[in-house]
């Protein structure tokens, strides 16, 4: 028996199902705990599938929690306090036990592009910056494709052009990613004016 997370990388304010797999035989009783041990002070819930009245809420039960007949547990509106060690005990013909360490991730915020000079002219140096919280990786695109070779990336967050020219004009977007989420900025239209 094992516990599988659905989704694998749950995020704050999202939901997660601690899905039980590998059980053979009829489930007679299920008990869930959160903490280092399966002692009564760490009990979330205990129930007997098929008997709607036989649901026992433990000391750390929360109304955001839903228990399913197959032994799985769902937690809605996740927050940081949901992180930690979970233990499930399932009684079939013989007792089964499994543990899981649940991590809840902060999603990335929608990235915002800012520019060092809103009215750049040819031969100027200009920097575009992509700002997003909780991002582990930033990906830049110009007009939906790769960046011009003249662009210099720094920490993936800033894009610098020295001696910019009109071929660098276009729509720029950045995408922020972490292990649990991905968000893309609105387009920023870079227009290069001629120097007369």
Image: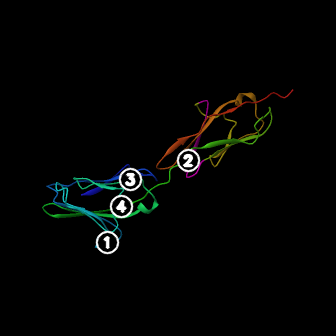
In primary-sequence order, the first of circles 4 and 3 is: 4
Residue 137 lies in the magenta stretch: yes
For label 3, count other residues whose C-alpha is less than 10 Å away and answer few (under 14), some (14-19) or many (20+).
some
Where disc 2 sits, the SS reads: loop
- Give whichever of 163, 36 is nearer the camera: 36
Q: Estimate the spatial distance between the alpha carbons at disc 4 and disc 3, rounded to whole Å.
A: 10 Å
Q: Estimate the spatial distance between the alpha carbons at disc 4 and disc 1, rounded to whole Å.
A: 18 Å
Q: Name the residue under label 3.
A: 76
Q: Quadrant of residue 51?
A: bottom left
**Magenta residues (range):** 132-143
In primary-sequence order, the first of circles 3 and 1 is: 1
- Between circles 2 and 4, the one closer to the viewer is 4
Q: Estimate the spatial distance between the alpha carbons at disc 3 and disc 2, rounded to whole Å.
A: 20 Å
Is there CB contact under 8 Å for labels 3 and 2? no
Where disc 1 sits, the SS reads: loop
x 79%, y 29%: residue: 193
Task: Determine which of the numbered discs, if any, sits on residue 37 in the image.
Answer: 1
163 left or right of 107? right
Is there CB contact under 8 Å for labels 2 and 4? no
Q: Residue furthest front?
A: 53
In primary-sequence order, the first of circles 3 and 2 is: 3
Where disc 4 sits, the SS reads: loop
In this rendering, is residue 190 above or below 3?
A: above
x 63%, y 49%: residue: 155
Q: Estimate the spatial distance between the alpha carbons at disc 3 and disc 1, rounded to whole Å.
A: 23 Å
Q: Where's residue 30, x and y in %?
A: 22, 61
């Amino acid at each position: 028996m094992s516990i599988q997370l659905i989704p694998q990388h749950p995020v704050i304010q999202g939901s997660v199902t601690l899905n039980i797999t590998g059980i053979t035989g009829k489930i007679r009783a299920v008990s869930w705990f959160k903490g280092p041990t399966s002692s009564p002070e760490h009990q979330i819930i205990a129930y007997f599938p098929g008997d709607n009245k036989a649901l026992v809420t433990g000391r750390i039960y929360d109304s955001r929690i839903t228990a399913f007949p197959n032994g799985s547990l769902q937690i809605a509106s996740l927050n940081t306090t949901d992180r930690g060690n979970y233990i499930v005990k399932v009684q079939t013909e013989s007792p089964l036990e499994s543990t899981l360490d649940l991590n809840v991730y902060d999603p990335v915020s929608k990235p915002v592009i800012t520019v060092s000079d809103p009215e750049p002219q040819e031969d100027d140096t200009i920097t575009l910056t992509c700002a997003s919280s909780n991002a582990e990786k930033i990906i830049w695109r110009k007009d939906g494709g790769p960046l011009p070779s003249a662009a210099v990336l720094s920490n993936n967050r800033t894009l610098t052009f020295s001696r910019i020219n009109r071929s660098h004009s276009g729509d720029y977007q950045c995408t922020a990613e972490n292990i649990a989420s991905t968000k893309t900025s609105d387009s920023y239209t870079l227009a290069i004016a001629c120097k007369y």
